[in-house]
Amino acid sequence: MIRFYNGRLLSFKNSSEITDDEVWVDGGKIVFVGKGYNKKAEREIDLDGNLLMPSFKNAHTHSAMTFARSLADDLPLEPWLYNMIFPMEAKLTGDDIYHLSRLAFLEYLTSGITACFDMYYYPQEMAKASTDAGFRTVMTCGLNDFKESIDKLEEYYNRFNSYDELISYKLGFHAEYTTSIDILSGVAKLAQKYSAPVFTHSSETKNEVSACMERYGKTPTALFDSLGLFDYGGGAFHSIWVNDDDIEIYKKHGVYAVINPGSNCKLASGIAPVTKLLNSGIKIAIGTDGAGSNNALDMFREMYLLSVTQKLAANDPSAVDAIEILKAATVGGAHCMGLEDCDIIDVGKSADLIVIHLKRPNMQPINNIVYSGSKENVMLTMINGRILYENGDFPGTDVEEIYKTAQAVTNRIKDR
């Protein structure tokens, strides 16, 4: 039993209300929120006025792409992907995925991220890396014309949704421009069979949408809708170049727009119309994308970039309220990923929590963490009741060995 007390609590149970309630954790669950819980705790954590809140959920990642950090900086999406990333990915083994993902998890933890929505290959190794690390991972498939298959996707869906409490799996494919209509139709049949949502990269670049229009006479979103891919909801990673009809399709099916502002800015892909999406009732989540197109896996940077790019694009400093961004990074991400037990701080919810240090210069006088906060302010990250990061340390984890192995993997695939 762990007791958090003497601090500020942002639970998101009652909007953005801040209280001074205590939070008690037993095993992987929150068992009490309030005052006067007369139990014995094995550890009592005096928050000393700091903020306890739900953790961040990284709703779009390619965790093992830590190998590609600064591998191909300053390139647009197509040459970056086809000339640099795909050739390097072809050299990766399952063991590589394991070790490179362990490195990503460390970075996630320092940013208060307790779950990632990962699209990559070798799901068995990714699942093992997650459970070994105690990290929560939702996986989806990078299925395309060159890797994986419909049969494999269905196998993964069934296997990894009963693998471990930290692991779940969603139907998905890489993108329209890498995936034939036959495969897309096959994914749609699985969505119908399992009444399941589908997730994919969509409308990331202007060229992507134009090329899809040339091929099918439809935007990617309209194509997916016509095939029944979104009949049970899902998510569209990036969602930059969406038109009014696309937005109506999102609204009709409850599709999440998963925004990746850091990656979108670095690749000059564009600015997603978040203000318009929110005003249209579209659900929003936030992701970092991979380290290859972003370099940093930092939710604070994503929140800030999302905010300021919207203000710049709209020429309106009031565009997108900061609390909406904070909700998208926490509650919105959890719901997008199917982690309804990890969304808010309440009795019976999973204990995925973070503590934000308010007694740092950037947070004094006490102010808004979306605009002023940074990963420097993350004091503690807890997943499923386990403290995996605290005051700059990773208890029980051989960090140096993870660094060393990840560097060796990166050196090997670059030298081949």
Image: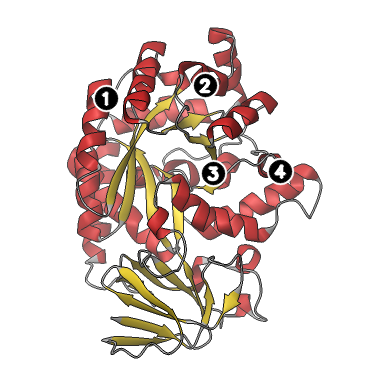
Q: Of the two numbered discs 2 and 3 on the same chain, state the one appearing first in sequence.
A: 2
Percent coordinates x, y for residue 118 in the rendering: 36, 43
* Amino acid type indicated by mark 1: Glu
Please give the residue where the numbered disc 4 appears in the rendered image.
279
Percent coordinates x, y for residue 230 in the rendering: 47, 27
Quarter holding the C terminus is top left
Q: Gap in Å between the C-alphas at discs 1 and 2? A: 23 Å
The answer to whether the residue labelled 3 contacts the one labelled 1, judged by CB atoms less than 8 Å apart, is: no
Please give the residue where the numbered disc 2 appears in the rendered image.
225
Q: Gap in Å between the C-alphas at discs 2 and 4? A: 22 Å
Quarter holding the N terminus is bottom left
The answer to whether the residue labelled 1 contacts the one labelled 2, judged by CB atoms less than 8 Å apart, is: no
The part of the image, by quadrant, that contains residue 266 is top right
Mark 2, Cα crowd under 10 Å, few <14 / some 14-19 / many 20+, is: some
Q: Of the two numbered discs 1 and 2 on the same chain, state the one appearing first in sequence.
A: 1
Please give the residue where the numbered disc 3 appears in the rendered image.
260
Look at the picture and state if 315 lies above or below 120. Answer: below
Direction right: furthest residue: 315
Look at the picture and state if 41 lies above or below 400. Answer: below
Please give the residue where the numbered disc 1 appears in the rendered image.
148
Name the foreground residue: 104 vs 174: 174
